[in-house]
Amino acid sequence: GAGVSQSPSNKVTEKGKDVELRCDPISGHTALYWYRQRLGQGLEFLIYFQGNSAPDKSGLPSDRFSAERTGESVSTLTIQRTQQEDSAVYLCASSLAWSSYNEQFFGPGTRLTVL
Amino acid sequence: AQTVTQSQPEMSVQEAETVTLSCTYDTSESDYYLFWYKQPPSRQMILVIRQEAYKQQNATENRFSVNFQKAAKSFSLKISDSQLGDAAMYFCAYRSSSGGSNYKLTFGKGTLLTVNP
């Protein structure tokens, strides 16, 4: 595809339910990143993948959050037992490789609302 | 840990005028990258300009330029000849160029820019 895509665009869920957010990176990009953007805030780093492995998961807010990546392509961010504080825009980015020189290209994000 | 501060939550400018957005950062590293990203209502983060810390020359991209003051840890964005399409949230970001955390961007809280016709 031409750019990073994310689905769904918007997700409304009830407190306590599980949600899955999907990210399709740019073809050939080996590095993939998840960020969270709370209302009125900048982006917070959550996790990144180099290939299918996640060397750094320290940004995940709690053990209710998990992510996986398969085939060095699609990634899924799962939030279990959602809480109202999880409401945010979740942005995915990909880059050719993980080194700092390579630009991160962002998707349009998924807006998650937990009622 | 690195931090990025944007002290102007909102700014406004008249069309065709010039506006400067401020950003300061804190780091103990000597080599890093700084970025300005634009986020329109579509939520898509768009890279506006990048500066390598080892370069003394300020980066320029068409109507966008930066004033990089390494000693002061300041990195401001100047938008010349402002256009209605420049209206967006602007984020300053930092990225290490080496070491264990050079894969992630650290963002400020953003400045909402309004362009008045």
Image (cartoon, coloured by chain):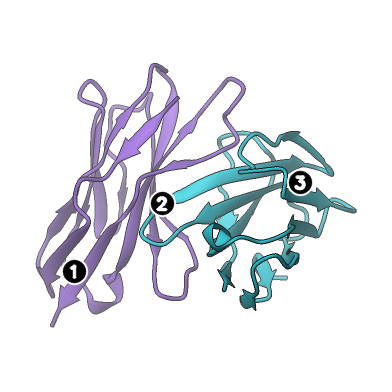
Chain colours: A cyan, B purple
As helix, strand or loop, the secondary structure at mark 3 comes to loop
Please report contact status of discs 2 and 1: CB closer than 8 Å, yes or no. Answer: no
Q: Inspect the image, locate mark 2, and give the three-letter code of the amino acid beneath it.
A: Gly
Q: Quadrant of residue B7?
A: top left
Residue sitting at x 55%, y 63%? A84
Q: Which residue is mark 2?
A: A42
Vertical position of residue A80 compared to residue A114: above or below: above
What is the x, y in percent for residue B48? Answer: 38, 56
Q: Is residue B57 left or right of residue B37?
A: left
Q: Assign a secondary structure to mark 1.
A: loop
For the residues labelled 3 and 1, the Cα–Cα distance comes to 37 Å
Whole-percent x, y for residue B94 in the image: 42, 37
Of circles 2 and 1, which is in front? 2
- Looking at the image, tell me whether mark 2 or mark 3 is earlier in sequence order: 3
Q: Quadrant of the N terminus of chain B?
A: top left
- For label 3, the residue is A30
Residue A59 image offset from top left, x and y in percent = 61, 39
The quarter holding residue B98 reads top right
**Residue B82: assigned label:** 1
Q: Which mark is residue A78?
A: none
Residue contact at pointers 2 and 3, CB within 8 angstroms: no
Asked if A109 appears above or below A53 in the picture, the reply is below
Residue B29 against residue A77 in the figure, above or below: above
Say whether residue A67 is left or right of residue A93: right
